[in-house]
Amino acid sequence: MSGEYDVIVVGAGHAGCEAAAAAARMGSRVLLITMSLTSIAQMSCNPAMGGIAKGQIIREVDAMGGFSGIVTDRTMIQFRMLNRSKGPAMWSPRAQSDRALFSREWRSVLENIPNLFFREDMVTGIIVENHQVMGVITQLGQTIFSQAVILTNGTFLNGIIHIGERQWEGGRMGEKAAKGLTESLVQFGFETSRMKTGTPVRLDGRTIDFSRLEEQKGDPEPGRFSFTDTPALNRQRSCHLAYTNEKVHAVLRTGFDKSPLFVGRIKGIGPRYCPSIEDKIERFSDKLSHQLFVEPEGWDTIEVYLNGFSSSLPEEVQYHALRLIPGFEEVKIFRPGYAIEYDYFPPVQLNGSLETKRISRLYFAGQINGTTGYEEAAAQGLMAGINAHLKITRQPECILKRSEAYIGVLIDDLITKGVDEPYRMFTSRAEYRILLRQDNADQRLTPLAFRLGLAGTERMQRLEEKTGKISNLRKMIFATSVIPDDINPYLVQVNSTPLDQSVKMSSLILRPQVSMKGLLSSLPALQDFYQHLGPSGQEVMEETEILIKYEGYIRKEEEMASYLSKVDDIFLKETIDYHSIKALSFEAREKLSRIRPRTIGQASRIPGVSPADISVLLVFLGR
């Protein structure tokens, strides 16, 4: 199989699927190698996409021409926009998906990409010549050559599953671990370490008394992730809330002496922001109760996912504790919760394109980089796929700035700061979050996707129509006067001061109590304009309102981003001998030598590199 492929993608999780799809659609011949073709894009943990900051990432992936948003829209069973009570920078879409349908839909998407080919096998090593990757070696004895390789191995590299005192090799329950690849990479000088993650118990929904739980319905007017014309969600399944109690905690504590986490059998670092139930009880011992989310696994299954009850305690302890939760007295377990340990490679070994520094044309994406979450993995996979194609076709790499996308924040954090626990995205990690809203991801990124060949003419036309409608609506709002008699009844209703003279509609929208939706019923001119907006009316109205209400904040962030981008444009040569610059602190010399930042901006974000060190570097560069 010599030279048959341009790009080989190893692993078909969320990172691998996006990587393979992107590279193939840009024109590369891609081989996607997975240990199981029936587990493509498996939702190993909860059957949901999006959430705080994660929803923004999926909208960005969609705006860049990825498929995670489209597949989610086609398979979701519930949609909620989180944080509506907060400012629009915090609004985050989240959807429950049908787990089985999600995997089937992703496979269908991939199988309909002409340049994409598949192989069921395990990659055990890479082929390298002159510090450049040349292909892979598989368990079945095949040597497959390519111009670039993207590793997206998830939790499979030397994976070990733990339930109580039992442990065995596996990358996921029921699937074997990937052996040999870590050892192959270590031979080429890569640094590796261990992490852990966990997944909760799966339950038989027929044995839960939902009448004793708190129902959590989807939004009355469900939205979508994709900026394309994906199908509207016409029916939804409810989630439910349940709560632990002191009796539950007492039973769980009886298993602590057999917990692989507490007795030291697990050496890997676990996710601080998504702890196991035993972790929560230990760390928050003052809390008498913890909230659990009871989530359906799909449209036509009785299987239920208990979000918030991740555990590696013995199965009998999990079972007895569960039965003390109100509504779970007769519950039956489909599968106990378990923890999994796996190899990852500290991401400071990567460039901003996700290409490794040691070996040219070799890319890492997803949990292999120490991240957690489908969304973070999908974003990395997309960017690795794009950059692998650009590299082999000798085009400039694509690196998103922190002011352009959450994806830019994610990758910059990984390669600059590294990880000391599984990395999860939060809105607080983004210093430009008013610019990086979920509603404007298409305006930020789709023009770039169009230039890369990942967004078609139809997408660009939709975007141009939308921006045109927003512009026209803004003009109308700033030009239209409102008289007191028309609007005062609404203002009184929302506890806003009535008018005593006519004002421009734009000044009303600046009031915190006033919304565009609320103004519709009182202002015929606005209502008439809204009806002419067509199906995109609600989206256009919402974004226009945000732009008017937050105009001052948006302008300040744009000015700050412009100012700080100047240091991101001051490049540092890879050949700089930082140890010879004695004016740098010892820690800065060590960190800069290890991470090799590309720009002064990236150097300034490295923990341990002080403003004084940055000043030294600027003097060194003659700045």
Image (cartoon, helix red, strand yellow):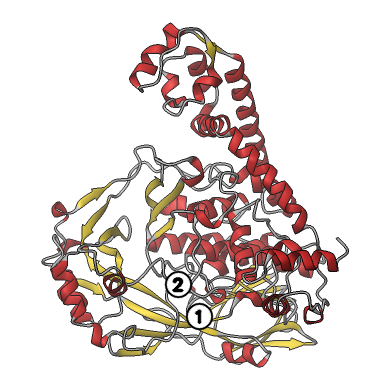
Residue 35, numbered circle: 1
* Residue drawn where x is 73% and y is 48% of the image: 563
User: Residue 532 is drawn in which quadrant?
Assistant: top right
Kindly give the residue lying farthest to the right in the view shown: 622
* Residue drawn where x is 68% and y is 51% of the image: 449
The answer to whether mark 1 and mark 2 are in CB contact below 8 A is: yes
* Residue drawn where x is 71% and y is 76% of the image: 585
Q: Is residue 248 visible?
A: yes
Mark 1: which secondary structure? loop
Q: Position of residue 387 (x, y in %)?
A: 71, 65
Q: Is residue 410 left or right of residue 386?
A: left
**Viewport quadrant of the C terminus:** bottom right
Q: Nearer the viewer, residue 530 or 577?
A: 577
Question: Three-letter amino acid code at disc 1?
Answer: Met
Position of 77 relative to 416 (above/below): above
**Viewport quadrant of the N terminus:** bottom right
Between the residue at mark 1 and the residue at mark 2, the CA separation in whole angstroms equals 9 Å
Q: Residues within 10 Å of mark 1 (few under 14, many from 20)?
A: many
Q: Residues within 10 Å of mark 2 (few under 14, many from 20)?
A: some
Q: Position of residue 290 (x, y in %)?
A: 25, 62
- All told, the count of numbered labels is 2
Q: Is residue 349 left or right of residue 344?
A: right
Residue 520, numbered circle: none
Q: Position of residue 285 (x, y in %)?
A: 25, 70
Q: Is residue 114 visible?
A: no
Q: Position of residue 331 (x, y in %)?
A: 15, 67
Q: Nearer the viewer, residue 362 or 389?
A: 362
Q: Is residue 460 left or right of residue 168?
A: right
* Residue drawn where x is 56% and y is 34% of the image: 550
Question: Three-letter amino acid code at disc 2?
Answer: Ser
Residue tagged by mark 2? 39
Mark 2: which secondary structure? helix
